[in-house]
């Protein structure tokens, strides 16, 4: 069956995935005289950098997701379809989806990345990941439920019930650990006076020699100091060997007993069947040239986390970091190149411009690296907030997030700690 | 296994269910020199009167639920347990729950009411109900998904895909139908330009001779006029005979083809096993005396929707209406009577004071009945909003709900139409 979208004389661009890269492309393409079809398995864009705040009950899910249709209400040449893409027929320029087939003139694959458990099924089964808003809500529910359950387990099991381990000390792991530490300090003793939170450990486990490994050494050091001051156990040069739901065995054979392991230790591209084998590189990424064209495919581009572009720049000789900034800049470059093509001009190769990286550890505690400078503490934290507020889609969302932050800052005490489950349970 | 709650010389009040009645009692009891244990299957209070706005993507779930623990942070004599109550042992004054047993000195059953499908399993299987925040979110997901699906069904099936039927024209059914009608008019054509919303019917089905049957005739007439003007098909003196997920057969043998039936046509008490048989009355309510004491039980009280008190007042000769107001007033009376008992004074029988009833149909359209007066339209709508805002728990929640209402009023256009599912899916 074909997906029923009007076929006119306009060139049809099909975008798979409305993350940072795909959305950037859609927003700019709709201004041209082309047809734009966006396909996503969700009907909303997710603002991934703030997932950890949803997972720790600091923000509502609805404040950091934004429905695509709302965003494109005025674009007559825009079509959205809620669907899962099954495979691509590169020869005939057709994609197969859960709701039928669709032909394209130009294809953009911006499917992003998902959790990588490196083949360890046992960890995958027991750990909680945080690569989608659903998963973030699941962590929120899980964490809150652990405290409720802790009230009724025997004394000997209380500590493992309360303890939370986080694998991976990139920005996600660091931010999560920091927020949980603040929750433990400021909120939990008030809400669970019957529990002894000295029995709760927050353990952050990182394989590399330092946390925030992609940042400068000083930033890593600073972040680690913040975390330790807040009571987080930071273990570097340490990996998770196995986890059965209770016993977490580390690479140095230490055992940590915990009922909750959050996995932020690795990602892999959301690869799609039908892309030429030659284009598949380790980490499930798709090999592209400097114009984001997929190797061995015609009129097909990969953008963002799922794309792997070997840069002349030595820093990115193995591809660019999988960051929102890269995806947005590639999307931007891509649309400019399409415009150039339409005008019969030359395309310009992509060049990544590092605008800076940052991570927040807690109240008044962040690390920020901008080109040529780095700074820490309160000012960095303010910068972090402004940058993130600016990037959230929707005026109302910005406002509500801002409001929550202010509220939280002064009261330490949001009312979002609710366990809402089972929404998707009913099969109908 | 016993639930581990410190047993001291204080009298232990166990409250089952933190709805309007149970919460009112808990808030007042904690001020006395007694121990208060609240047991609920959720860790939050739900503000039921606004479920329909969550179901229609006008409010976030988090704005109308409030975690119990947050509410009682300062009460040292308060204990919350997240649990399901299985049965009551009236003889030994013990309750059996999903997390163990608990003894009580005084028991309060304020378990509220749930959907009543009057034994029709087929309807129960296919219809969507709205008696909890989970169910409201499920309706939101369902309704939004129907539009997405409608894009890819054959032309002959589009109408049944878009059409929504609502059984029961009490306040819930009326408010839901009105809001859906506004959505159809102001929002959907903008977001789904590819769909023809003339094919979407909103059908409100009521067995009684009029909508809002508990209100005065003029209010019913007014509400019906509002609804019809907004494009809702209102069918009175009509019942749902059967529904198989597509074909809805009415009592007059008309068939409505719809993929979505929302059930707001009846409730029954959340009865608990172990209560003496003599106290069970039709509609699964618990028969109580004028002090809310359960017939045939010692030191046990039922409050609110689940309680059935035969009043001397002829208007309530078959029991009081199942409304928040009744639950709150009974809760209030109950605590006063407990205080009286502690002081060796006489208890005072409950007397319901009708403070008024109201329902909102849409923007600037509400019906309000206060003792001695009734009014309609814009002013009624403002009154409805103020009354509901006042009753929502939490300053932040009030503020966010207010903000959403204002935003919605001026833009007709919130960004909450997201389909977030599967949060509870993972079994771990």
Image (spheres, coloured by chain):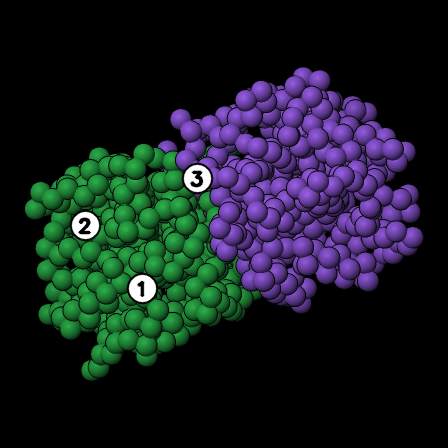
Chain colours: A purple, B green
Badges 1 and 3, same chain: no
Tell me the SS state at disc 3: loop
Identify which residue, B238 or B272, lies in the foreground: B238
What residue lies at 26% left-to-right and 52% top-to-bottom? B202
Q: CA–CA distance between discs 2 and 1?
A: 18 Å
What residue lies at 81% left-to-right and 58% top-to-bottom? A380
Q: CA–CA distance between discs 1 and 3?
A: 51 Å
Tell me the SS state at disc 2: loop
What residue lies at 88% left-to-right and 36% top-to-bottom? A313
Relative to A201, does residue B31 appear above or below in the rendering? below
* Outermost residue, left side: B252
What chain does mark 1 sit on?
Answer: B
Q: Which residue is mark 1?
A: B324
Q: Position of residue A426 (x, y in %)?
A: 37, 36
Badges 2 and 1, same chain: yes
Q: Which residue is mark 3?
A: A6
């Amino acid at each position: 069956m074909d997906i029923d979208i009007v076929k006119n004389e306009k060139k049809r661009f099909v975008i798979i995935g409305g993350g940072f890269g795909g959305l950037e492309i859609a927003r700019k393409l709709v201004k041209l005289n082309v047809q734009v079809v966006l396909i996503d398995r969700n009907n909303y864009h997710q603002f991934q950098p703030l997932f950890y705040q949803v997972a720790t009950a600091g923000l509502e899910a609805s404040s950091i997701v934004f429905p695509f249709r709302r965003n494109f209400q005025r674009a007559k040449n825009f079509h959205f379809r809620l669907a899962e893409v099954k495979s691509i027929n590169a020869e005939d320029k057709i994609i197969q989806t859960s709701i039928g087939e669709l032909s394209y003139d130009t294809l953009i694959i911006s499917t992003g990345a998902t959790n990588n458990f490196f083949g360890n099924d046992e960890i995958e089964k027991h750990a909680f990941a945080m690569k989608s808003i659903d998963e973030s809500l699941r962590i929120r529910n899980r964490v809150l439920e652990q405290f409720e359950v802790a009230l009724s387990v025997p004394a000997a099991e209380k500590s493992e019930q309360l303890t939370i381990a986080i694998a991976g000390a990139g920005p996600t792991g660091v931010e999560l650990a920091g927020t949980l530490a603040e929750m433990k300090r400021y909120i939990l003793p008030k809400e669970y006076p019957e529990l002894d939170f000295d029995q709760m450990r927050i353990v952050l486990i990182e394989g590399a020699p330092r946390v925030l490994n992609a940042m400068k050494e000083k930033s890593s050091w600073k972040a680690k100091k913040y975390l330790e001051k807040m009571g987080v156990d930071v273990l570097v040069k340490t990996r998770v060997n196995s986890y059965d739901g209770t016993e977490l065995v580390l690479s140095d054979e230490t055992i940590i007993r915990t009922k909750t392991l959050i996995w932020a230790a690795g990602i892999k591209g959301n690869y799609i069947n039908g892309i030429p084998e030659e284009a598949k590189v380790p980490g499930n990424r798709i090999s592209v040239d400097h114009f984001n064209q997929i190797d061995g495919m015609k009129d097909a581009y990969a953008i963002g986390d799922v794309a792997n572009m070997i840069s002349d720049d030595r820093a990115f000789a193995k591809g660019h970091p999988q960051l929102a900034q890269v995806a947005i800049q590639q999307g931007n470059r891509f649309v400019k190149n399409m415009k150039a093509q339409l005008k019969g001009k030359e395309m310009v190769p992509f060049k990544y411009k590092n605008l800076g990286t940052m991570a927040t550890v807690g109240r008044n505690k962040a690390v920020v690296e901008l080109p040529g400078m780095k700074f820490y503490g309160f000012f960095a934290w303010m910068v972090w907030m402004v940058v993130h507020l600016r990037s959230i889609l929707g005026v109302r969302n910005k406002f509500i997030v801002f409001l929550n932050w202010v509220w939280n800052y002064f009261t330490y005490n949001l009312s979002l700690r609710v366990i809402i489950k089972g929404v998707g349970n009913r099969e109908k």
